[in-house]
Amino acid sequence: MYDIRLENVTKKFGDFTAVDDITFTIPKSSVTVLLGPSGCGKTTLMRMVAGLETPTSGKVFFGEHEVTNVPTKRRNIGMVFQYPVIYRGTSVRKNLELPLLSEKLSKAELDKRIDEVAEILDLTSVLKRQVEELDNGTRQKIAVGREVARQPRIILFDEPITNIDLTSKLELKRSMKELFGRLQQTIVYVTHDQTEAMTLADQIALMQDGVITQSDSPKEIYEKPNSQFAGWFLGNPGMNFVPPEFIKVSGSKITSPLFTQTIDLGSKASSVDTFGVRAEGISVTSSQAKDGVQARVTRKSIGAGGQYLLDLAVGSLLIKARVSHSIGRDAKDSVWTNIASENITFFDKAGKAL
Amino acid sequence: MAKSVETLEKSIKDVPKAKKPESKKNWFSWGLLAPVLFFFILMSVLPTIWMFGLAFYDYTLTSANKPKLIGFRNFFDFLANQQLAGSVSRTFVFLLCAVVIQTFLGILIGVLFWKNDKMPGRRLALTLFFTPMVVTPIATSLFWKFILDPTLGVMNYLVSVLGFERFDTLTDQTLAFPTLVFVDTWMWTPFMTLMTLAALGSVPKAELEAAQVDRLPLTRLITTVIWPHAKFILGLGILLRTIDAFKTMDLAYVMTGGGPGDRTELIAVSLYRFAFKSFKLGYSSAVSVFLMFIAIALTAIYLYILNARKKAEQ
């Protein structure tokens, strides 16, 4: 298998720079998710890996081979598009078979691969059907199966579950998770949906304005965002940010009415501007706690798993806290809240984590 | 249980629908349509009805006799007319040659333009290439007549410079008809190119890209990706071209006047002669009605084929 190396890759469309001087390695035999909001350049980056776009400058390598100007046909990649692509006028089996024909496999091997993929994707019962008869969800499964059955060294997924209905979305996500576990290929997956990214990724490359701002495992990137953007974009709800007026810096020590204790940040303390905390990093109690401040509950909603999401107002500060079922259920208009030091990430004026 | 479901269904059905001010809305849309409808009825529907009526009369402008209702006599007359039968079959040969050649060339050129979408000067080339289609057919006919003129024309000048003998294609027994097909092709191939480009444009980009990724061979690319999307627009193009070729009049009338002999006498030329040279309005109306039915039949066949394909797909 190959890793994919990008060296100073830039892509401009007229005056617009979609991808801005990215140097990055996508490790082999793992799932890398390019995550970011619309227009951040993630799809363009993937299309350059596929050879469907040519970089304005920079180089793309598959392992040791430079492929910057190699046409798509000769890159030996698979790609699943946002729009479910099917080859019309044929059966589902034929669709899965078409890309395999250029591989010159034995009949037995061909059938084995198709049957295997069909089983994982739950397509066995529709193998004989005409593709036009099927809904978008099934069509996308066919597209996934087609790319996987061919066993190319690199498989690219461009927001594959964005355009299909909810049930198929969940089904397909589950099948892909299973497939990704079995596959040895280098997989690149583009999405703007952080839940999808968290579910499927071995590592996430977070993109903003044409650059990769952070790349790490889902856990790392969630727990240790290196920028306010990363903190805000990952997580539902995104990270809470507490502005400077709630923070007091004296020498290397930082205090806040919300903190359970004083935090010593050493030399970095002077550049602290804001701090961030995840919704689940905020503790809430109904009765007065030792440290902490009183907060008003402005909104209360129950979420998946019975946890509650509380909108809290501490003076002029609005934050969201995720709390256990019992605390949420018992929370009245007024609660007590504080934040433990391990749940806090400090940011400087530019929004970079300290 | 069943009953409660029933009542539930009923209550869903009985939910009062939001009322739109139907009448107001209707007036507005009719108001917008009115100018078009007015001209359509005045210029198209009424004359057609008029023509249907005239077909049953003996009505000649040059005769002093009053129009006389003669039933189907006009129809019997022209069905018995050998010359007219000749024009009809000649028209079909013309139509077949022209449409086949133009479709073939149009697709070929369209694919070339489509494949080379980054070629410098592509836009200019396209614009120039489409010019024949937008020039009035009469003008086209006239200048081709000049080009081909045996004494004054550019073509014969070149022929004589090269040392060959000048010749007159338009009065030549064997060359006149192919020349007409040639000029028609010059004029209408751009249309088929345009339709080809539109048809190819209707193929989703992702499917074409997927075909590249999946390394589909060209034949597969055409049969499973391009054709399923392109066939409707291309079919429509062929249909429009067929109907139009069937009505070709100006080209033949200006360039050859139907000659030499009746070699290029297309049905529309004969019709023109009956109506505006002999002023036999009744008779020519009958011929027109007949032609209209042929055109409708052609359209129906095409639509049937297109629909059958669509149904098969569903």
Image: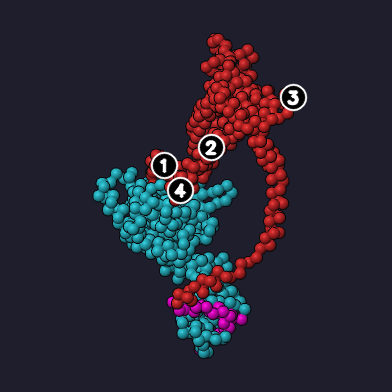
- Nearest to N terminus: mark 2 or mark 3: 3
In the rendered image, the vertical position of residue B257 relative to residue A244, given as above or below: above
Q: Are marks 2 and 4 on the same chain?
A: yes
- Kind of residue at badge 3: Ala
What residue appears at the point 39 percent right and 39 percent down from the top-left corner?
Answer: B219
Q: Which quadrant of the structure image shows residue B136?
A: top right
Query: Circle 4 — which element?
Result: helix
Judging by the rendered image, the residue that carries numbered circle 2 is B297
Label 2 resides on the chain identified as: B
Give the CA distance from mark 2 to mark 3. Answer: 37 Å
Q: Mark 1 falls within which chain?
A: B
The circle drawn on residue B239 is none
Query: What segment carries the magenta color?
Result: A290-315
Which mark's residue is nearer the viewer, 4 or 3? 3
Residue B188 quadrant: top right
What residue did someone put label 1 on?
B223
Q: Earlier in the sequence, mark 4 or mark 1?
A: 1
Query: Quick check: B145 left or right of A156?
Result: right
